[in-house]
Amino acid sequence: MIDQRNEIDAIEAERYELFEGPGYKFHFDRRDFIKAFGAGIIFVVPLGRALAQQRGLGESGRAGSGNQLPNDIGAWIHIDEDGGVTVFTGKVEMGQNIRTSLAQAVAEELHVPFATVHLVMGDTDLTPFDMGTFGSRSTPTMAPQLRKAAAAAREVLIELAAQQLSVEPASVKIVDARFVNHDKSKTLSLAEVAKGRKLVKVIPENISTTQPKDWTIAGTSVTKVDSRNFVTGKHQYTSDIKREGMLYGKVVRPATFNAELITSDTRAAEAMPGVKVVHDGNFIGVAASDQQTATKAANAIASDWKSPGQPANAELVAVLRKPATERRGGGEGGGGVSRPQGSIADGLAAADKKLEQTYTVAYIAHAPLEPRAAVAEWKDDQLTVWTGTQRPFGVRSELATAFHLSEDKVRVIVPDTGSGYGGKHTGECAIEAARLARAANKPVKLVWTREEEFTWAYFRPAGVIDIKSGAKSDGTITAWEFHNYNSGASGIQIKYDIPNNDIQFHPSNSPLRQGSYRGLAATANHFARETHIDELAHALGIDPLAFRLKNISDERMRAVLQATAKAFGWGQTKPAPGHGFGIGCGFEKNGYLATCAEVAIEQPTGKNADKKTAKVKIVRVVEAFDCGAVVNPMHLKNQIEGSITQAIGGALFESIKFENGKILNPRFSDYRVPRFSDVPLIEVVLIDRKDVPSAGAGETPIVGLAPAVGNAIFNATRVRLRSLPMAPDGLA
Amino acid sequence: MTRVTALNVNGKKMTTDVDSTTSLLSVLRNDLNLTGGKYGCGEGQCGACAVLLDGQPIRSCTTQVGRAAGKEITTIEGLEKDGRLHPLQEAFIKADAMQCAYCTSGMIMSGAALLAKTPRPNRAEIINGMNGNICRCGTYQRIINAIEIASGTAKEMSK
């Protein structure tokens, strides 16, 4: 059961996703579908309904407001004449393996082999509208949608097969992609049923789908789709695409953020053979027949920028504590996310121990290994852009606005992309490539450098969190006051049974451009909360696991805590000298997790070592995760292991340094990310709840690592660390 | 300016005409259409561009093409022999040792070089040999497992 506050949480969780640019409209109609897909059978759903379904599940209120509701249809499945099954979804694949798990769902409902199903993803001309691939929404919303479409397809195909076989539909079954009658005396292939047909069928609303307990394809560890293409280097990412006559682009960047162009001199660049220079407002860029020339030409452009004074790291906490006066980036203004319950004053009066602490988190970068890239091509006034984005339809809108086009003149295609982690919602690179391509009248590829990606994308919000709490000597928490400044409201709500609580989020004027990051603020809020809970437990002299269990009645949360503790051996052994154990738990986006960590504090050795600075080595991590019915155990484990590994960076050493509108560490040699040598032994415990709908799982497993590690460091050293990253240069 | 007009890539002689100071990665990707190796950082920090030069793993983004002339260059495209994958390519699929897979080419080239030098590496040797390669999706544990599978030292598969 989702209680009311969790429902608020489910909606609030999305509010801090970065949305920029206008809304949308649709242009494909029924006749276009037939033209585009050729013969066969197409299964459609009225698009208004599909969108409403998404909205009902929490993606409401932003892109849709004030826009015309679509009255057109969306096509989800096409049974090709050769018996292949093509599925259309606006979701995109960036390593989370949704291409695989959605195909599992469709193959299951259609009763066809997995390999029969092919997904077309993130192509604004071919796929139904989609808000974007974020918020862990693909599994809970897109998979059921496609299951319905596939189930409807199966019913229609059985009816058509029955007509062809001259038998009753009730006697026809699909076995291995063949339609067979009751005694198997008559059979037809999928191709034989689809051949020569030109049918468009609407998916009935009340179609029923296979329940998790009856799954045979979902629920299994199907191998990643296209994995052979990935291990052979054949897969084409955006940055690998080449078009006829294509040029390479390079943009001249401002000296600082928020800078205004005063003067520029492009003559030297324009004099270079084959170089096209574009100067349009604050935008200066070049296109040339090869990357070296483009870079040389961009470097030859002299530009003078006027920069306002801007805050530095050192002032960050003070800046973030000031309330927002403007709306920018992902912030939507507004204050708290739930009404206070009970009375904090009463709760503190009843407490034997009171605690008040402040926690902070730094800005960090997504640093997807494939930096932003785009290939733009104009044919007359039609624009096509290949780009790696989590929001193909959002980027289409951005392009249409930037070039004063109607959206039916713009097509965005997203090849399976070199990751995003929430960092690829926006279309900057697509717009820049398209601007250059229009001027050059040739296709242009633009690939951001690592430094550009570190500087001109956006960051996970930094934040300041104040917590005031009280508890009785028997371990009952009586008061919980929580204020988050700037980082966001995701994961801010508690699973602890605290009668007096006041939990608020306060937006600030962020000095840096900020937006979505895997798990959003759930990482910050869990770090602060689970560290503070550990502090309370120690103040009361109660075991941190026992303290949590005493204050949590939610059965699923108790189950992940107990499963993690059991696998880790919590309470069974004492840490070795210099080692420490820590625990934390959490809930977000309908996923439950608990994490245990063991750390080793390594004293520096060697003649030149700084004797004062010890190193933190994470030795072992155990995480139990419950996201409802498990769709693909292997890929789920991979996501959880990856989340834990990525979380090590934000927990221990990742931090963006900035001053006067400049990023001071925009490269991997200055911005350390987790490497092989940072990785502990990771054990994942999956709790497969066949009775609960599957939740998305790409984000939530990231939130448990930081507090578990911080609590383990305290266990080893008695030093409490309250700022992320906790040990950027070791333990001082 | 010196020009480079021929390169030995994956056992074939390929013709080109580029300035010898151009990065090898750029020549492979843009001139020879071998896009398996990726740009990740341009400073030799992430290993997405790793290829072999006379069997030794190098960072093609910081290697001038002039240095590769006359030597044998092996890219990910050259690892498959007669339609059969290299054992490490097979092992990456088996161990699910990738997510977005943008790092995968570089990981496999670095891993293949490690295995050629140390056929049965222990965990510390794998970590040491692979530490110059970044996987932002964090699949390191599975990549270690894949290398163990390919070398025949894997205890169990992390399904």
Image: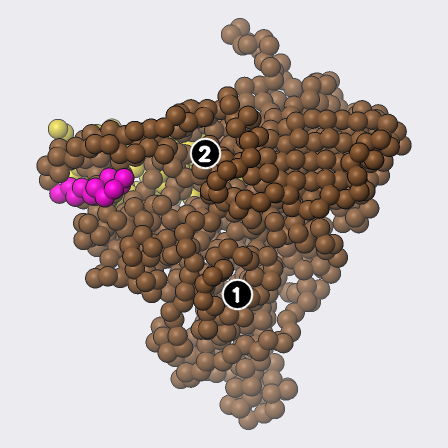
Colour of the chain lettered B: yellow
Q: Is residue A54 visible?
A: yes
Whether residue A630 can be seen here: no
Who's the residue at 83% across and 26% down the image? Answer: A353
Side (left or right) of A587 relative to A512: right
Quadrant of res A293 = top left
Q: How far from the left and from the top, in percent, is residue A684?
A: 67, 42
Q: Which residue is mark 1?
A: A51
**Three-letter amino acid code at the position of disc 1:** Leu
Element type at mark 1: helix
What SS does tag 2 mark? loop
Mark 2 highlights which residue? A512
Tell me the brown chain. A
On whether residue A283 falls in the magenta region, the answer is yes
The answer to which image quadrant residue A108 occupies is: bottom right
- What's the distance in space between the residues labelled 2 and 1, CA to CA? 33 Å
Q: Chain of mark 1?
A: A
What's the magenta region?
A: A274-285
